Structure formats: C-alpha cells, structure tokens
Amino acid sequence: MIITKSKPKEVFLRSLEGFERVFIVGCGTCATLCQTGGEEEVDAVANLLGKRTCGKIVVETPCDIRVLRRDLSPHLDVVDAADVILALCCGSGAQAIGEFTGKIVIPGLDTLFVGETERIGRFYERCRACGDCIIHETGGICPIVRCAKGLLNGPCGGMANGKCEAGGHVRDCAWVMIYKRLEEQGIVERFKEIRKVRDRSKKAEPQELRMR
Amino acid sequence: MKSAYSDFMKALNDGKFVFTGEIEPKKTTRLEGIIGAAKTLKSHVVACNVTDNPRARAYLSSLVASYVIQKETGLETICHMTVRDRNRLALISDLLGASALGIRNVLVISGDHTTGGDNPGAMPVYDLDSTQFVQMVRGMVDRGIDLNGNAIEGEVRLHVGVVGNPNADPLEVEVCKVERKINAGAEFIQTQIVFDVDKAKRFVKELNSSVPILIGIFPCKSHRIAEFIVNKIPGIYVPREYIEGLKSAESFSNATESRNKIDTVNIDYFSELIKELKRTTRTAGIHIMTMGYESIVGKITDRVMEKVTR
Ligand code: SF4
Ligand code: SF4
C-alpha cells in the first residue's frame, strides 16, 4: 500500500491562499486505509474550508486515469468552475488528477512510502520499488529499505547490540535480522555470498512499463 | 605473495609488527595541523590513516590531505574512502587520482550515516557498499579495468583494506561480514578501537583468514574522552579501572605532572594490551587513533618495542 500522511493544516491552507473555489478529491483505496483521504477526511477538510469548498468526491483509485474519468465525469462542470483542486491522495493520484482535469492541484498529503500495515496508524516502509527484487537472497527482508544505508553486504560498523546506528540504535539492524532469518531457514551460508553491485540505471530515468 | 606497492604492505608481508597512526583533517583550509600531526607520528609508525568525513562531518578531503602529508613529511598514508558520499564514478576517479599521486593504500569505510552528521539533510549515497568497493579496487589493480570493465590507462597501484569491529555483538555476523570482504579481495584489516584485550583476541581467533589484522586502540587524553566513548559509541567496553586511572592522574594540580601521569596510565595500559596480543595471537600490528594526542604514540610504541621511554 502507498502510505500517506496529512500535511499540517497550516501548510495546505497556506498553499490554498488566494483560491476561492476549492474542489476536494479523496482516494477510496490507500488513502482511505491510511485515514488521510477517505470520506471522513474529505468531509473534515470540506468543513474546515467552509464556503470555499465548491465540491468534493472520493474517487475509488485516483491514480487510475480510467477510474478518474468514470468518477469525475459527472462532476466536470463543478470541477471546471473550481479555482483549484485539493488532492487528498498520493502524489501519483494527485498528478493523474492534474493531468485529467488540467487544473492546479494542491497536494493535501505527503506520500511517504510503500509499506506494510500493522494496524491503522502503524505503517512500516518495506519496498522502494527498486526494479530488481532480491529478497529471496536475504531471508525475505529487503536490505534496500530496511538497512538505513541500503547495503547489500552488511552489517556496517555502526551496528551495536543488533541495533542500527542510524537513528541512534533503536531499530533492529536489517543485516542482523537477515542473518538470523537465514539461520532459521537453514541457509545461513547465503549470508556469506557477495552480492554484486546494483544496476542503478534501472531507476536512473523515469520508469514506464509498456507491455502492450 | 603479491608484490607490495607500499612500505606498509611491505612491512606486513615481511611479518614485521606494524604500527599505524591516524590523522583527522578538519573543517578548515589550513594544512599546518595535519602536517604537524604527521611530523609527530612519522618516526613511530609505518603509515598513518587519513580520515574521510568522519562522523559524517564535511571536512577537508582525505585524498588532498593524504597527498599533502606524503609530500610535506614523507609519511606514508592510508587514505580512507567512504562509500557514503560518492557514487561509483566519483570513487573511481578518486582511486585513479590517488594512484597517480603516489598514494598506495586505501581503507574503505561505509561511513557513519548522514543523519548523524553536520549536514544531516545530505543525500546518503551508498551506491556501492564496502565489499563491492573492494571488488572494484581488485578489478582496477589486478586487471586494469573499472567497475564496468572499461580499460584504464596506466597501472593502478593500490592496496585496499577494510574495517572490522571486535566489539560487535552478535560477533558471528560481524565475522561473516569481514570474511566476505576478505573474499572480495581485501588485503588488510584495521579494527574499531578496542580496550578489552579478550575481545580483540576472540576476534583475531574467530576470523578464519591469514589477512593481516591491525587492532585499533585509542589512548584517551582525559577521563572525559573515555566516558564519552562509553556513552556515545555503544558496544565499546572501557574498563572502569582505566577510567579511574585517568581520573586520579588528572587530580594532580601541577599540569605537567598531571600530563605525565596520564601518559603513564596510557603507556602502561596499552603496552600491556599490545604485548598480550603480540604474544598470544597472530595480530599483525596496532592502529593507534589519537585525535590530537599524537605525542603518546611514540611512547607506547617505544615501550612495546622495549626501547627506553623518555
Ligand atoms: S529488493 Fe526491496 S526495494 Fe527492491 S523490489 Fe524487493 S522489496 Fe522492493
Ligand atoms: S546498522 Fe545495520 S541496518 Fe543500520 S545501516 Fe548499518 S548495516 Fe544497515
């Protein structure tokens, strides 16, 4: 899931300064689960803006142009009359909204990471979409994200008592976790293998996938 | 055994017990400090390490400092290169530059994380990790090619070393990691500082390799520095008696006397530790970090090598 966090009220209110008619778009999927862009949050922001709110909607998946078209089309007159759209969804959704409507879009959320949900309000980054997944070599634990340095042959010298230097020895060191997991799986010799340099060109340019 | 490009490597190959020192360039454009420190160290160590933005602080370049030290004082250097601040392009150019300028030893370091440094908003690079850096150096030195197989004009004459941490817990993970770096082609190991001789002994014993190991030590100029290590570098055990020894040395009102006593505490403590390692393990030498307390180095090395102190 894409994990988002609401921008502080003062921040998006400042971005909205000078705009009179605001149309609010929420997200029915990830941002609803994060409680940042579902019905409730869209309503709350609409109330906050009061008369300046000229319309609001929760689109099932605003990052999908087809769904945006389907859900926004019945409201296009209101959208067209708006000065600005406030997007309560991830950055990908916010851009799709801008692309589809041609309107100025103000992000109401900060997009944080691709993560795992423990419970609502507890999310952990688990994947950085590196384009070359290797977690079968690392006991199912992603070192790109979970090692603060993204090392492929850790741990680094900052590990102490199994904890990670970054952030002051609070989080577990990913490479100690990987070692233990591989040990449990009976394949600890994999730990000793040298994992080769990554091909960063995979992420060096904007990514597109065109299969058809 | 491969031929040695450096005096440091030659001494290790010859089986000599080797001492290295360490110099930390600061956030400065002045060179007197590093040159002065190098002059103090010169007759007591085979080579001195030159740090590269330690603790993620943006300081004078290790490569420039290494070059200046060698040129001005003749002391051989072991130039640190962290993989934190430069991607593979920048690291390759620095390695070519180092070799061209007569620097013959590099020590690869992951580098303390940027968020703990003096420009915490910096991008942490880590394009390569230290193991991959070692592999890259091997390609450059042994086969004359860069990481992507591009040919290099002229020989690259460098020895590459890595760091190990005898204080690490769990130690078996650390040992596997260091062995991995050795398999990648590391030629020497310098360790994190150790105060506990048993930890050093265990590390040397557990490491299944004949690559020379230099154990790191850090004579403290005051008990405050020792306390700082206890509080700020987790995992490093500093014996209470050592700290108390420094404390009572500091209680002398006469400054010179107090300084001499502090020296004595350090000379006694570390020469015993070194002799013990020398006698009971295959430790190849000692890396002495000082951070401004360079004057102690010769006193410790003289004692260990049974020369008369003072
Ligand atoms: S290796 Fe990590 S960042 Fe890459 S795809 Fe797998 S989980 Fe994601
Ligand atoms: S302590 Fe472990 S998780 Fe943290 S940066 Fe070092 S290797 Fe990575």
Image (cartoon, rainbow, N blue to C red):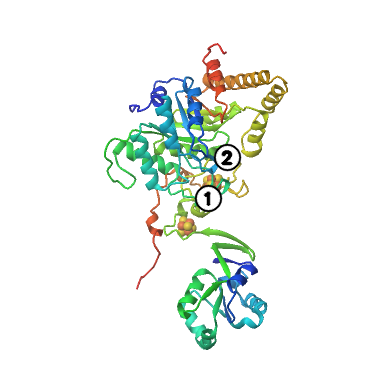
Does label 1 point to a residue whose CB lies under 8 Å from ligand 2? Answer: yes
Q: Is residue B246 above or below residue A101?
A: above
Q: Mark 2 vs mark 1: give the one in front.
A: 1
**Which residue shows up at 36% across the image and 70% down it?**
A210
**Which residue shows up at 57% across the image and 62% down it?**
A116
Q: Amino acid at mark 1?
A: Cys
- Residue assigned mark 1: A147
Quarter in which the C terminus of chain B is drawn: top right
Question: Disc number at residue B230?
Answer: none
Q: Is residue A69 above or below residue B93?
A: below
CA distance for labels 2 and 1: 17 Å
Left or right position of A131 against A178? left
Quarter in which the N terminus of chain B is drawn: top left
- Residue assigned mark 2: B170
Decide: few, some or many residues near mark 2? Use Cα within 10 Å; few <14, some 14-19, many ≥20: few
Chain letter for mark 2: B
